Image: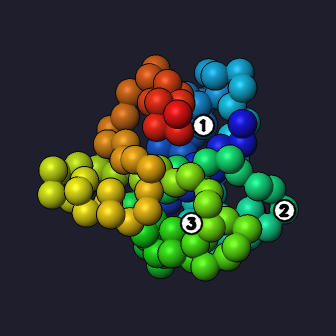
Amino acid sequence: MNILYVDDEPDIREIAEMALELDPQFHVRTAASGSAALALIEDWMPDVALLDVMMPEMDGPTLLTHLRQDARFANLPVIFVTARAQRSELQNFSTMDAIGVIAKPFDPMTLSSKVRELIG
């Protein structure tokens, strides 16, 4: 399963990549920005994308809007990853066509199982 993880923080990207690759069926690629993610998926189709909500230039919700405007990615399952995990914010994210939200800081030992749970 191909997983795209997008986050502007290099340390978090590295931890997420290592954590997700604990699952031998996950193949992870990362991007440092929304624009880098859009360039990456031109040549590599993920099965699910994890998007940081708060990033400079293009945040996760804006990236999701761009993905939905492209027929190739209209049905791509997206999970938001955010430090803004208040109940009202989580409800707002759930209305944005994402399949779920993972709160930061996440537990690296359970990240892959949480992703599997959300994608069904």
Q: Earlier in the sequence, mark 3 or mark 1?
A: 1
Front-most of 78 and 9?
78
The residue that appears at 72% across and 26% down in the rendered structure is 25
Q: Amino acid at mark 1?
A: Glu
Label 3 – label 2 distance at C-alpha: 16 Å
Q: Amino acid at mark 3?
A: Ser
The residue that appears at 67% across and 65% down in the rendered structure is 73
Q: Which residue is mark 2?
A: 43
Q: Is residue 52 left or right of residue 116?
A: left
- Image location (x, y in percent) of residue 39: 73, 70
Q: Is residue 82 left or right of residue 8?
A: left
Q: Which mark is residue 60?
A: none
- Image location (x, y in percent) of residue 89: 21, 59
Front-most of 96 and 27?
96
Q: Which residue is mark 1?
A: 17
Q: Which mark is residue 33?
A: 3
Among the 4 quarters of the image, the one containing residue 60: bottom left
Examine the rendered structure and indicate whether residue 50 appears above or below residue 68: above
Q: Residues within 10 Å of mark 2 (few under 14, many from 20)?
A: few
